[in-house]
Amino acid sequence: MNAPRELLRIGPDPDEQASAVELLKRTPLDQLEEEVRALKKVRPAVEVRKAMVERIARAPLGDFETLKHIYLKHCGDVPK
């Protein structure tokens, strides 16, 4: 996948960046773990954790096990 800076860009203006929630919401499930890993390098861990919680809350039940695995692996140690 692209460099973290490019992943966060959503508009033609380079200063316009997606929030972590927006970014994870539009990321396909099969690319989500890579996206979370890259996002944690450029955003606070607490923000990434909140974005994952939002993604889990809105996901279909069939995606839950995959999302749980990604959350526990990358966000389980983040303070609340």
Image (cartoon, helix red, strand yellow):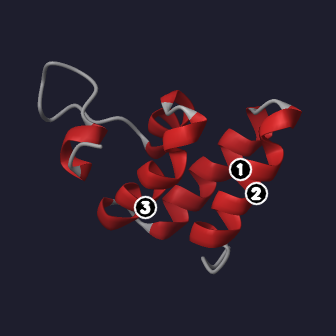
Label annotation for residue 10: none
| Residue picked out by circle 3 | 37
User: Distance between the Cα atoms at labels 1 and 3?
Assistant: 13 Å
Residue depicted at 38% across the width and 55% down the height: 39
Residue depicted at 81% across the width and 45% down the height: 64
The residue carrying pointer 2 sits among few (fewer than 14), some (14 to 19) or many (20 or more) residues within 10 Å by Cα, namely: some
Residue 59: % across, % down: 76, 33
In the image, taking residue 76 as reference, residue 13 lies left or right, namely left
**Rendered image quadrant of residue 40:** bottom left
Where the N terminus falls, by quadrant? Answer: top left
User: Distance between the Cα atoms at labels 2 and 1?
Assistant: 4 Å
Give the structural element (helix, strand or loop) at label 2.
Answer: helix
Give the structural element (helix, strand or loop) at label 1.
Answer: helix
User: Distance between the Cα atoms at labels 3 and 2?
Assistant: 15 Å
Where 16 sits versus 43, above or below? Answer: above
| Residue picked out by circle 1 | 67
Residue 46: % across, % down: 54, 66
Residue depicted at 52% across the width and 53% down the height: 33
The amino acid beneath tag 3 is Arg
Give the structural element (helix, strand or loop) at label 3.
Answer: helix
Residue 45: % across, % down: 48, 68
Where 19 sits versus 67, above or below? Answer: above
Ranked by sequence position, the earlier of labels 3 and 2 is 3
In the image, taking residue 72 as reference, residue 36 lies left or right, namely left
Ranked by sequence position, the earlier of labels 1 and 3 is 3
Give yes or no for contact between labels 2 and 1 (Cβ–Cβ under 8 Å): yes
